[in-house]
Image (cartoon, rainbow, N blue to C red):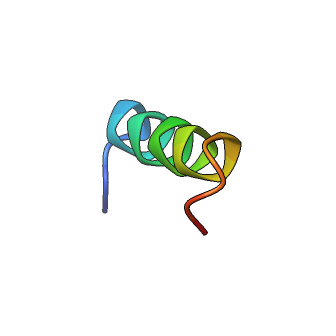
Amino acid sequence: MVPIDKQLVYLSELQKIEGEGVI
């Protein structure tokens, strides 16, 4: 299992990428 804090970091990174319009 992935630690919750790592999941939060992963999700926050996805949001950053989406916010920059990369995806």
Would residue 7 be found to the left or right of residue 1 on screen? right
15 w.r.t. 2: above or below: above
- Percent x, y of residue 16: 55, 38
Instruction: Find residue 8 and report its horizontal and vertical position in percent.
Output: 49, 36
Q: Furthest residue to the front?
A: 21
Q: Residue at x 32, y 43 (%)?
A: 3
**Residue at the spot x=54%, y=46% of the render?**
11
Residue 14 location in percent, x, y? 54, 51
| Relative side of 8 to 1, left or right | right
State the residue in front, 20 or 9.
Answer: 20
Residue occupying the point 68% across, 41% down: 19
Q: Quadrant of residue 2?
A: bottom left
Which of the 4 image quadrants contains residue 9? top left
Q: Quadrant of the C terminus?
A: bottom right
Looking at the figure, which quarter contains the N terminus? bottom left
The number of callouts visible is 0
Query: x, y (%) of residue 22?
Result: 55, 61
Q: Is residue 18 above or below residue 22?
A: above
Q: In the drawing, does residue 12 fall left or right of residue 6?
A: right
Q: Name above or below for residue 18 compared with residue 16.
A: below
